[in-house]
Image: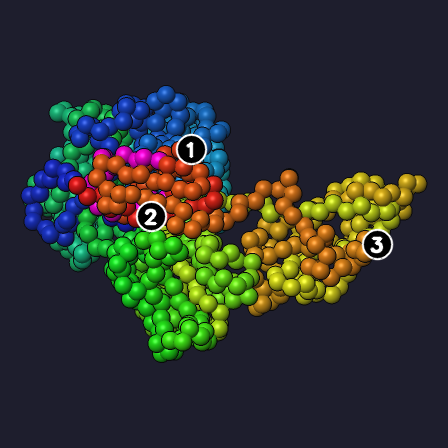
Amino acid sequence: MKKFTQMSFAFLMIFLLSGAFMPVQANKDSNALDPVTILMDKSQASGTLPDFINDAGASRGAAFNGQYVFVASRQGGNNIYYWNVNNPDAEPQTLNMTGVSGGTFPINDVTTAGNHIFGCNMVMPGMFKVYHWSSLTVEPQVLIEYDSGTARLGDAFTVIGNPAQSASVVVSALNTNNFYVWEIENGTLVSGTPEIIEATELDGTVNFARVTQVPGENLFVVSGSSIGVALIDEDLNLLAGIPSDFFPYWSMYPHIFYHKGERFLAYIHVKTDPVENKLYILDLNDGATVAEAMTNLAASTFADEVVYSVSLGTVSNGNASVGLDVVTDPFGNVRVMAYAAGNGFVLQQFGDEAPDGMPLPFMETFDGEGEDTPDIWLPEGWVSIDANNDGFNWYWSPGPSADPNGQMRSQSAYQDDEGDWQALSPDNWLITPRIFMTQPGENEKIQLSFKIATGAQTPGFRLENYSVLISTSDTEFESFENLWTETLTADFDQNVFYLRELDLSAYAGEEVYIAFRHHDVSDMDRLFLDDVFVEIVADEEPEELIYSISIFLNAGEVEYKYFVVVDDPSWDLGEWTGGANRVFMVEGDATVEDIWGDRPDDNGDGKGDKDNGPFVVTFKVDMTGAMVGEDEEAFAFDPELHKVFIAGSFGGEINWSQPGSNPSLEMTIGDTGVVSVPEIAVETSHVKLFPNPAGNQFTINSDNRINQVVVYDVTGRMMENRQVDGFEVRMDSSDLNNGIYIVRVYTDAGVVVNKLQVHR
């Protein structure tokens, strides 16, 4: 017999959301499922069922992968809707359904395996199709296209295993004992022809039957409208069974799961007279093995074994179309999504284990306690360490012009009692509280952003050096690894904050400390730090950095190469060290398009023409994602800090000019290139927010035109996003509860972040 593939997944962790309790029926005491939290409720029983999934005959399947709930529906078209557990009140999105067609019903059921999404049509009979979405945003691929012959396929199916490695697609055939099984290896279907397995040992037909795996074992449970619940091995040998008459009616889509050391059996109960659609969870602890426990359960009385149940609604569901998925998060909480066609779904969490670290979004604006904030003030949970014991450490300051919006500072020089400047060589650490890096969703990333500045009036004293480090264990220095080091340049403006952004997605699911270290610098001035945010943001493709320059050239062959200049003119940072130059044959006006570091064997040849020029040749180089330098000394190109020059055999005074020495050869962002310059925040003294604390309204004014105001609560939920146009904006806060809010003010000069307290 064909073996089902063993499933092994690390499911997504999404942090606990609050919610109300559903009515619970529990005839058997068990504290293992407490407490129960409703994460999302779109059910008929609660009166929250969306009208586009309320038809039991047209919205038959649902699935949950740990973050998103999917529902397949033909109401108003063929769609698979999905809801994000992190934003349960938002309108659902839909998968791309390009090419989904054919069959009696083009889309009928949906299931997931990790982040892979699968949907199928229903045929009775016809050309059966299974579609695969590798992510939320892609077009579906036709995974299976199979002539079902006389079989009705597509009422119910599951995918067992990891599709990227090894998995099985298991489809039940109505009014038969047959399962149709396709194998997937390394993301590819092994054969378009399934193995048809007759489950002769099951008591009844496999109508609407589904197969799921017992966690941690190569055992499987299967149920259908007439077979009760059976335990089978990978060869479909029957190991134990609970007959259909043990249950009050149809027992659909069974799952065995563990929580707090106890074993449970969950399934969807469907009854037509009277109409009932429920999630039942039964005790399955009476036995050393799953087989023994199921045998003992069958010998007991159903009502005595019920640990938990909840009603989804009372809309008739004669096809027993259901969805049930059980996902255990990294902290041991169990999330159960229960769905019944025409009645909607409820997503619940059993347990309230949570990380020690603060959840995302993590936001600190260092506003202190107002103008009277002492300089030794630190936000709650933050730690500052003077590692070289020179008596100087990170300290709080209200910022330029005595603005109460504060920032953290560290010195590399100080004035003594006589007013003379004395050098410091700081090794000052500023460390965040422990932060839990919530798992980002599809097309999202975890981003650390912060703003950095210097207070030196003289450009030559602005060369402060700092690093950003991360630890996944503790705050001992040796536990930190370096993420980013930067030495500020003389080009930095005094008291102007520059935004920096780092991708921390590699630490998803972990608890971390982040450190800002001021070090390896002496006798400069002061380093400023503000607005440290760690949050989940959209993971967008980097925008193009196309640098260009137009040069008058005579006909003939020219050699050239591109260089990056950081500070002073230098030949050091070319696209490559030594070797051949780029070559281009000038024959007329032309545009040359290159990619930094891409070494072609030959960029052109030819003999020119009768017209010797001069011609206008435009050179363009794509600096998107460019790395400058070699090996361990390589660093990422930064358009805010670095310049791009071209050098070559151009003749006259510009023939092989040292990069940086001839301003006329500096390349700039061309009209055909698009660049997103990192936000530069205006000095906070130029934006005022008052009164603060606010009652039912507050006012923002700025020396620069205000374009947008966004208000967040402390959990990062957007409360208001207002487009404006003016120098003063009056905001209504009457709908905000008492508490702390984050206000982002977007002006023509940059972005300022303020804390707002609402108190009535």
Q: Residue at x 32, y 53 (%)?
A: 404
Q: How far is mark 3 from mark 1, CA to CA?
A: 51 Å
Q: Secondary structure at mark 3?
A: loop
* Position of residue 398 measured from the top left corner of the image (x, y, whole percent): 34, 57
Q: Secondary structure at mark 2?
A: strand
* Position of residue 356 measured from the top left corner of the image (x, y, whole percent): 25, 60
Q: Which residue is mark 2?
A: 754
For residue 485, above or below residue 197: below
* Magenta highlight range: 729-744
Task: Characterize the magenta stretch by its predominant secondary structure.
Answer: strand
> Does the magenta segment cover residue 449?
no
Say which of marks 3 and 1 sits in front.
Answer: 1
Residue 169 in which image quadrant: top left
Residue 224 shows up from this direction: no
Question: Which of the two labelled residues, at mark 3 and mark 2, occupies the earlier sequence position?
Answer: 3
Split into 4 quadrants, where in the image is the C terminus?
A: top left
Q: Which residue is mark 3?
A: 651
The number of numbered discs placed on residues in the rendered structure image is: 3
- Residue type pointed to by label 1: Asp
Viewer-closest of 77 and 558: 558
Question: Residue 376 vs residue 288: left or right?
Answer: right
Say which of marks 3 and 2 sits in front.
Answer: 2
